[in-house]
Amino acid sequence: MIPMQQNFNDITFLTGNRECLEKATETKVLPVFSDAAVSFLSEMSNEILKDSRTKNYPDVAAYAFFLRKSSLTRLKEQVHNAESRIGRGIALHIAPSNVPVNFAVSFTDALLAGNINIVRVSDKPFSQVGIICDAINKVADTKYPDMKPYVQVVRYPHNDDITQGLSSMCDLRLIWGGNRTIANIRKAELPPRAIEYCFADRHSLAVIDADVYLKSNAEQTAKGFYIDTLYTDQNACSSPRLVVWTGKEIEKAKERFWDAFQQIAEKEYELPVIKVVDKLDALCRLAVSGNKVKRIGKSNRVVRVQVEKLTPDLMNFKESGGLFFEYDAYDLNEIVPILTKPCQTIAYFGVDKQALKNVIKNSGARGGDRVIPLGHTMDISILWDGLNMVEAMSRLIISA
């Protein structure tokens, strides 16, 4: 049993309790995709989908569908040597403050990998967190009490001692957040055999073939792009900040695409006033950087910036709140300067995904971990940032 320091009293438990935390190092790990974990998660799915609040949050509904037993069964097929894998131990998750459902996806992957989970969530009052934690508590209290120690969602004020105390217990630490957050959390030392995964500041782009797009359903495509971007205020690392156009009728496609997107943004997106200032500041800084730019847009809600060239520093000027860079390409290899290490996702529409993968491989680029259809960059998966998360968070029992 871990002796609890006095400052651990500042921890608020949204799920689990102090006793679960005290006994975490004694709690046994589970096999990968254990029957207990799969049953618990699939029952969570039922509870979330029954909650009347869920209909207001597409991200929560998507998470619930991800937890269905049929979905989890298919996921197991993506894990190599699943039958010989077991959890590493205690997984400490530091969840981001700007993507509400991320905390749940993180612990879900780790639970499927067989781990005991301690998840620190932001103090921000996200309704999504409440819906999911309510489902966890109901299922754990009524049907699966033995699973309560495996999902402990907590809040505590910024406190280095608490973070160090939790870190000293863990076998695995996942930090989701900006580079500054990661640097601060890393001040807390880990046990010698613990491993760590950091999911830092990233950026993403979209590549659209104008000619193919003009034959598509404009409203449907715009809705998908909205979910990819403004639904999370472009805070998700998978949210495209740059749209690269290919094809012959680029100008016609742009007009149609952005008109449809603007209509949805006007109805669905509430633009914070500070974002207007931030976007103007970013545009001014980009303009004096040496890249010729042209602002395009009918309102401050959606601001497009046409750039003359793609440079590795372009994303240094990115902003959320509906700021998009645009570039017209005659060859897919023109995106290579953007494929720096922080580049995560390439969303595509009407473009051959293998051609995009070849651009990454043949250029030897450090970035470009995901090539995903436009409208699906936020889809939940155990594959993230170039990792199979279940494999990364489990250990393989090797036999000879």
Image (cartoon, rainbow, N blue to C red):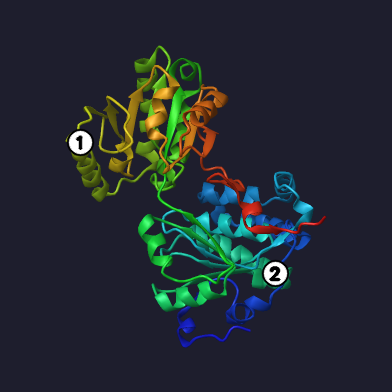
Amino acid identity at mark 2: Met
Identify the residue at the far top of this view.
Answer: 248
Q: Quadrant of residue 160?
A: bottom left
Nearest the viewer among 398 and 340 is: 398
- Residue 70's tag is none
Q: Residues within 10 Å of mark 2 (few under 14, many from 20)?
A: some
- Mark 1 vs mark 2: give the one in front: 1
> Where is residue 61 shown, x and y percent of the image?
58, 49
> Where is residue 12 shown, x and y percent of the image?
49, 76
> Where is residue 116 shown, x and y percent of the image?
64, 68
Q: Secondary structure at mark 1?
A: loop
The vertical placement of 330 against 242, above or below, is above
* Residue to which mark 2 is pinned: 147
- The residue drawn where x is 40% and y is 48% is 235
Q: Secondary structure at mark 2?
A: helix
Structural distance between the alpha carbons of marks 1 and 2: 54 Å
* Residue to which mark 1 is pinned: 289
